[in-house]
Image (spheres, helix red, strand yellow):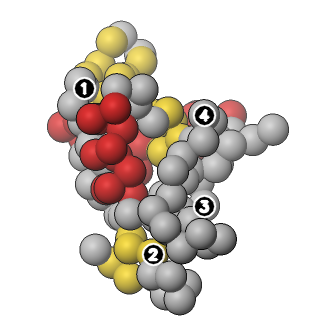
Amino acid sequence: MTRSCSAVGCSTRDTVLSRERGLSFHQFPTDTIQRSKWIRAVNRVDPRSKKIWIPGPGAILCSKHFQESDFESYGIRRKLKKGAVPSVSLYKMRTQGIVELM
């Protein structure tokens, strides 16, 4: 099953083609404080409960939502720096379904 980026309004999917184009995909941190920062940054609302969205175990964000300075290179791989928080192209989701740029 192909996973999709969890950011509101992002249609990027974790595919071979996406990775060949240089995109990377990152799971939400397990550290409680860092995970909370990511959840707040994504600012997504659960459509059923109308409360803040809580990511499931397979939730990911694509590299489009991080600044280049958030990454470290390890040979051909790149990894998010410790403490990196998504901050690029994130939208606010209102409960009425309206999406606006943050």
Q: Residue at x 40, y 30 (%)?
A: 29
Q: Specify the quadrant that holds the N terminus.
A: top right
Going from N to C along the chain, the mark reached first, 3 or 1, is 3
Q: Which corner quadrant holds the C terminus? A: bottom left
- Amino acid type assigned to the residue bearing label 3 in the image: Ser
Compared to residue 52, the image places residue 82 above or below, namely above
Q: Which residue is mark 3?
A: 11
Q: Earlier in the sequence, mark 2 or mark 3?
A: 3
Q: Quadrant of residue 50?
A: bottom right
Residue 62, label in figure: none
Q: Gap in Å between the C-alphas at discs 1 and 2?
A: 27 Å
Per the model, the C-alpha gap separating discs 1 and 4 is 21 Å
Asked whether 63 or 20 is in front, the reply is: 63
Task: Please name the residue that numbered disc 4 is placed on.
Answer: 57
Is residue 6 visible in the rendered structure shown here? yes
Q: Are the residues flagged by discs 3 and 4 in contact, CB closer than 8 Å?
A: no
Q: Nearer the viewer, residue 23 or 40?
A: 40
> Is the residue under label 4 in contact with that under label 2 (CB below 8 Å)?
no
Q: Residue 40 sits in which quadrant?
A: bottom left
Disc 4 element:
loop
- Identify the mark nearer the N-term, 3 or 4: 3
The number of numbered badges drawn on the structure is 4
How crowded pointer 3 is (Cα within 10 Å; few <14, some 14-19, many 20+) is rated as: few
Residue type, mark 1 in image: Lys
Q: Nearer the viewer, mark 2 or mark 3?
A: 2
At horizontal 38% and vertical 51% (from top left) the residue drawn is: 39
Question: How far across and down, in percent of the image, does residue 10 sit?
Answer: 53, 62
Amino acid type at image mark 2: Met
For marks 2 and 3, give the CA distance: 15 Å
CA–CA distance between discs 3 and 1?
24 Å
* Mark 2 lies on residue: 93
